[in-house]
Amino acid sequence: MSIHNVECLIFNVKLNSKFKIQNSKLLRSGFSMIELIFVILLVGILTYIGGNFLPDNRLLNDTNFLTMQIKKTQKNALAYDAVGFSKPWSKEDASVCIDLNTTVLEKDDQKAQKPHRFSSHLSVDGNTTLCFDNFGRPYQSEHLLLKNLDMNLTYKQDEYRSISVAPISGYVIIEK
């Protein structure tokens, strides 16, 4: 055998032994069960801590939903009487009135793809039924509103929003 052949043989043996060692390390590499449980536990703790920093928007969602329902009712009333001969406070069409009760509002929203659920408590000063005439003016009990209709949404004890419906214009005012 020549020296060249011997060197090639030694090189092949070294290469094969390195390849076998690397293959066995690759087969043994991976995570143990304890490492996986530790990582899952760590991700869970970080998720819990991060979730506490997210804002709670339930009161804001309830406020926006109630405001949207009032504006939708007012819009329906504007298109109701095209002729203009009926009394502005006629109760011929129930779509121009809104019952300011969370249970009734949730029931009316059942047809929606994702119905709204109130998390807040709603309190209304005076009559809970608000109607709009064909000019968009708010009225209650067949009398146009002469002062603001005030509503309060309360979530927990320290979080609340006040909503007012202005007389004549029916403009909705949201106060913190």
Image (cartoon, rainbow, N blue to C red):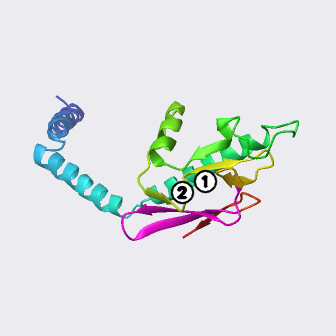
Q: Which residue is drawn at 69% across and 50% down?
A: 142
Question: Where 32 sits versus 50, above or below?
Answer: above
Question: Where 127 sits versus 108, above or below?
Answer: below
Which residues lie in the magenta part? Answer: 144-166
| Image quarter (top left, top right, bottom left or bottom right) of the N terminus | top left
Q: Helix or strand or loop: what does disc 2 sit on?
A: helix
Q: Name the residue under label 2.
A: 63
Contact (Cβ within 8 Å) of mark 2 with mark 1 = yes
Q: Name the residue under label 1.
A: 67
Task: Please tell me which residue lies in front, 152 or 35.
Answer: 152
Residue 147 sits in quarter: bottom right
Question: Where 34 sits versus 110, above or below?
Answer: below
Q: Where is residue 82 in the image (x, y as percent from the top left)?
A: 86, 36
> Is residue 61 found left or right of 93 in the rendered image?
left
Amino acid type indicated by mark 1: Thr
| Image quarter (top left, top right, bottom left or bottom right) of the C terminus | bottom right
The answer to whether residue 147 is magenta is yes
- For label 2, the crowd category at 10 Å Cα-Cα, with few meaning under 14, some 14 to 19 and many 20 or more, is many
> Is residue 120 found left or right of 140 in the rendered image?
left
Task: Please tell me which residue lies in front, 100 or 142.
Answer: 142
